[in-house]
Structure formats: structure tokens, C-alpha cells
Image (cartoon, helix red, strand yellow):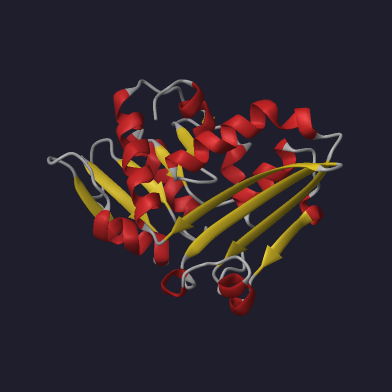
């Protein structure tokens, strides 16, 4: 089977280089796809420029589409093929986000601070932090974003080797003299590529309906 990666950025490049799939599968870039091919798995890790052509391809071949872009229009649209929307592909992070989604409301009467840090070149919306904020009853504007390298290195203790590629989140919940702190750290690209491989395996292992799925549904079903 073809595993088709759409995009030319860091994540797409990492997937093309190191995505682990079944031995009989072939991981290829979008431009190398075989036209008129049988059902494939398509992974959209691009800016969205090719999205209309990609969705047409998926409809024509009944190929499931794994959407890795944050805030995609695919989330609310009707589809004639399965779409899996993934705000994050790190499986451990997804499980933590699932825990917050179920229990975050318990802390909404307390003082909450949410800090996120990514590499200085990241300009897109921090989708994982937004997801966490909503689970905790916060607004997007309540998220404190850090992009200053000196602060990342000295205050957040991000190792020098990972300043160019990291995802850091810290939740601080306070009630008087009592406080809870949750901190997540993801360094490099390998955790995301591993997660995408596991999502691809789950897509292939289950008969999906022609609709939009949140990857959190996969987590809740125990598929990841």
C-alpha cells in the first residue's frame, strides 16, 4: 500500500525519512503518488495549498486522510472518506490531553497558569496548548507563549541541543498555599513520527466510517 505524505516542511520531511510502517508498504511524497492507484493512506502535513486536490484524490480512491494541520477546515466538513484529525501525534501527549479533557473541569475554580514554548521559528497557533486551555476552562488569550531562546534555555531548562525543535507545556494550578504542576517536554521529531506510524496502523486495523474522527476517539477506543 502507498502511504502518501503531503507537505514539504519539517514534519513532512521527517515522516518521509523515518516513518515506520509495515514492510510491504511504501512511504512516498505526494508528487510521486500513482494516479488511479488503489486505496492508500494519505497524511497531510502541509500548509493546505494542495488540500482540495488531496481530498479529491481521497474521495476517488476511498483513501483515509490523516490531517496533521491545526485548525483544518476538514474538522467540520462532510466527507465521503474517513478523515482523522490530529492536533498532536505524540501518543503520550494525546493520552495526557485526554485526561485533561475528562477531568480539567474539576480545576476551573482555581487559579491556573498555562505556559507553552516551541522553537522560535514556530508562528502557527499552538494547537496542543489551545486544546489544554479549553479543557481547563481558559481562553486562548490566557496562554503564555515563549519564543525567546534565552528564556527557553535559562528559565525553562530546554537543552541547547533542542532549542531548534521542542514542545514544552506547563500547567500550574494554585489554591492558596497548595499547588499542582504538570509539565510536558517533547524534544526532536522522532516522537511525532513514531506516533504517526501508530496512527497509520490503527487506521489500517479498523473499518472506519466516512466521517471526521478526532484522534482522541482513537485514544478513547484503546486503538493507540
Q: Quadrant of the N terminus?
A: top left
Can residue 172 be seen at all in this image of the molecule?
yes
Image mark count = 0
User: Going 83% across and 43% down the picture, which residue do you hit?
Assistant: 177
Task: Check the image and name the residue furthest to the left.
Answer: 24
Up-down: is 144 above or below 200?
below
* The C terminus - image quarter: top left
* Relative to 24, residue 192 above or below: below
Residue at left 42%, top 49%?
54
Residue at the outermost bottom position:
150
Q: Is residue 84 above or below residue 103?
A: below
Image coordinates of residue 66 in percent, x first then y, are: 43, 42
Residue 30 in sight in this render: no
Residue 149, image x, y percentages: 59, 77
212, 99: nearer the viewer: 99
In the depicted view, which residue is nearer to us: 35 or 111?
Answer: 111
Q: Residue at x 46, y 67 (%)?
A: 165
Q: Nearer the viewer, residue 26 or 187?
A: 187
Camera-side residue: 182 or 17? Answer: 182
Residue with the most extreme front position: 177
Q: Quadrant of residue 111?
A: top right
Q: Residue at x 30, y 50 (%)?
A: 4
* Left or right of residue 169, residue 27 in this image: left
Residue 217 drawn at (x, y percent): 52, 26
Amino acid at each position: 500500500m502507498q502511504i502518501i505524505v503531503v507537505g514539504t516542511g519539517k514534519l513532512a520531511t521527517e515522516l518521509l525519512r523515518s516513518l515506520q510502517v509495515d514492510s510491504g508498504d511504501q512511504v512516498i511524497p505526494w508528487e510521486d503518488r500513482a494516479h488511479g492507484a488503489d486505496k492508500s493512506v494519505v497524511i497531510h502535513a502541509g500548509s493546505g495549498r494542495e488540500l482540495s486536490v488531496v481530498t479529491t484524490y481521497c474521495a476517488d480512491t476511498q483513501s483515509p486522510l490523516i490531517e496533521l494541520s491545526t485548525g483544518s477546515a476538514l474538522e467540520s466538513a462532510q466527507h465521503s472518506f474517513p478523515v482523522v484529525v490530529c492536533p498532536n501525534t505524540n501518543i503520550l501527549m494525546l493520552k495526557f490531553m485526554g485526561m485533561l479533557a475528562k477531568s480539567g473541569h474539576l480545576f476551573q475554580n482555581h487559579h491556573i497558569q498555562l505556559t507553552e514554548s516551541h522553537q522560535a521559528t514556530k508562528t502557527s497557533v499552538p494547537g496542543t496548548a489551545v486544546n489544554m486551555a479549553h479543557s481547563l476552562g481558559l481562553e486562548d488569550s490566557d496562554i503564555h507563549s515563549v519564543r525567546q531562546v534565552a528564556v527557553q534555555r535559562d528559565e525553562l531548562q530546554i537543552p541547547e541541543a533542542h532549542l531548534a525543535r521542542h514542545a514544552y507545556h506547563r500547567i500550574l494550578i494554585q489554591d492558596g498555599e497548595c499547588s499542582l504542576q504538570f509539565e510536558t517536554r517533547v524534544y526532536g521529531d522522532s516522537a511525532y513520527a513514531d506516533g504517526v506510524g501508530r496512527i497509520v496502523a490503527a487506521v489500517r486495523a479498523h473499518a472506519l466510517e466516512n466521517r471526521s474522527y478526532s484522534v482522541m476517539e482513537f485514544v478513547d477506543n484503546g486503538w493507540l
